[in-house]
Image (spheres, helix red, strand yellow):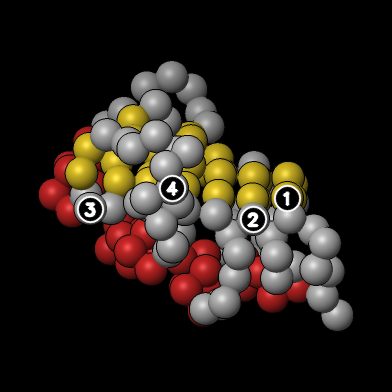
């Protein structure tokens, strides 16, 4: 069973992206504060024909196995122009600052810092907290 009319989903439940993208083939925006599956990057790559253009989630731990920098890069490069991934972190102030430089350095090496206005939809973006990069 699929639900073709659902385009936006906001949830705090645990989600498996491949299931969501299969059941909701025209889903364009997902926002979650829930638990992502361990293989969330593989999940999104598994569904080749999807309409997702915006994925926003709150993450609790950068050192968690659900956050592999190379897999993140694969996901970003595989998306259509205009796709935007927004990641924010939940926790006490400063808790993730010691971990963020590794991610920022990785993104600086593989992407271009700064964004293109979202209305142009000419490239794929990732935003971490208040900083943005785009796929050249």
Q: Secondary structure at mark 4?
A: loop
Query: Which is nearer the N-term, disc 1 or disc 3?
Result: 1
The residue to which callout 4 is attached is 121
Does 95 appear above or below 105? Answer: above
Pick the quarter of the image with the N terminus. Answer: bottom right
Sort mark 2 into few (<14), some (14-19) or many (20+) by Cα contacts within 10 Å: some
**CB contact under 8 Å: marks 1 and 3:** no
Side of 129 relative to 40 (left or right): left
Q: Residue at x 82, y 75 (%)?
A: 2
The residue to which callout 2 is attached is 28
**CB contact under 8 Å: marks 1 and 2:** yes
Side of 85 relative to 99 (left or right): right
The residue to which callout 1 is attached is 8
Q: Nearer the viewer, residue 48 or 109?
A: 48
Query: Which is nearer the N-term, disc 1 or disc 2?
Result: 1
The residue to which callout 3 is attached is 136
Side of 130 relative to 26 (left or right): left
Q: Secondary structure at mark 3?
A: loop
């Amino acid at each position: 069973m699929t639900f073709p009319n659902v385009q936006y989903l906001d949830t705090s439940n645990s989600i498996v992206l491949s299931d969501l993208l299969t059941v909701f083939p025209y889903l364009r925006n997902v926002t979650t504060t829930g638990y992502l599956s361990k293989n969330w990057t593989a999940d999104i790559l598994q569904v080749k024909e999807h309409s997702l253009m915006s994925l926003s989630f709150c993450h609790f731990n950068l050192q968690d196995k659900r956050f592999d920098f190379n897999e993140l890069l694969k996901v970003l490069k595989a998306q259509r122009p205009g796709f935007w991934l927004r990641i924010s972190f939940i926790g006490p102030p400063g808790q993730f600052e010691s971990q963020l430089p590794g991610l920022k350095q990785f993104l600086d090496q593989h992407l271009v810092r700064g964004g293109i206005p979202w209305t142009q939809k000419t490239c794929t973006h990732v935003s971490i907290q208040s900083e943005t990069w785009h796929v050249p």
